[in-house]
Amino acid sequence: MLNKAYLILYANIALFLYTLMIMARRLLASPNTFTTVFQNTSRTITGFINKTLAPVAQWQNVIEILLVFLLILLILRFFNVGLWILEIAAVLILVDWGYQYLMHQQNLALLFPLAVMLVSLFSIRFIAKEVGFI
């Protein structure tokens, strides 16, 4: 389970998720429809998590790292569904960036993280075919 292909797959999933978070953070800085929907959903989820996990607030970084590992394991366990979710997230980020670029709210500075995200997504797909997940 820990051969080179699996390690590269894990690294690409982590890179994709990290780049997705960076892109989302930078795109959500500009007010638009995508930002409003995301912030409303985020407030609901954050409120629930804060009420549920209030006693362990000092362990927040450890819990976040464990949740990322759990997310990666769930993506690998249910790979077809996980890959669809990753692709949908990438398309939503791409559409949001395109919309903001056309409205002159973003410039070409986000092209590099966008390229990293897309390359890691294609790499995930090709390595998954090689390993036999797809």
Image: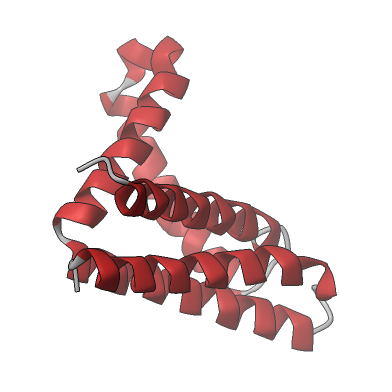
Label total for image: 0
Residue 30 falls left or right of residue 96: right
Residue 96 in the image: state x and y as whole percent.
Answer: 60, 77
Q: Looking at the rendering, which quadrant does residue 102 occupy? A: bottom right
Work out which quarter of the rendered image holds the N terminus and state it: top left
Residue 109 falls left or right of residue 125: right
**Image height check: is 113 above or below 1?**
below
Residue 14 in the image: state x and y as whole percent.
Answer: 45, 48
Depth order, front residue of 22/58:
22
**Image height check: is 41 above or below 43?**
below
**Image height check: is 42 above or below 58?**
below
Residue positioned 65% across, 71% down in the render: 115
Residue 50 in the image: state x and y as whole percent.
Answer: 37, 28
Residue positioned 84% across, 81% down in the render: 104
Depth order, front residue of 85/9:
9
Color style of the picture: secondary structure
Residue 131 in the image: state x and y as whole percent.
Answer: 23, 63
Depth order, front residue of 64/3:
3
Outermost residue toward the bottom in this view: 102
Q: Looking at the rendering, which quadrant does residue 9 occupy? A: bottom left
Residue positioned 20% across, 63% down in the render: 79
Residue 43 falls left or right of residue 100: left
Work out which quarter of the rendered image holds the C terminus and state it: bottom left
Residue positioned 22% across, 54% down in the render: 76
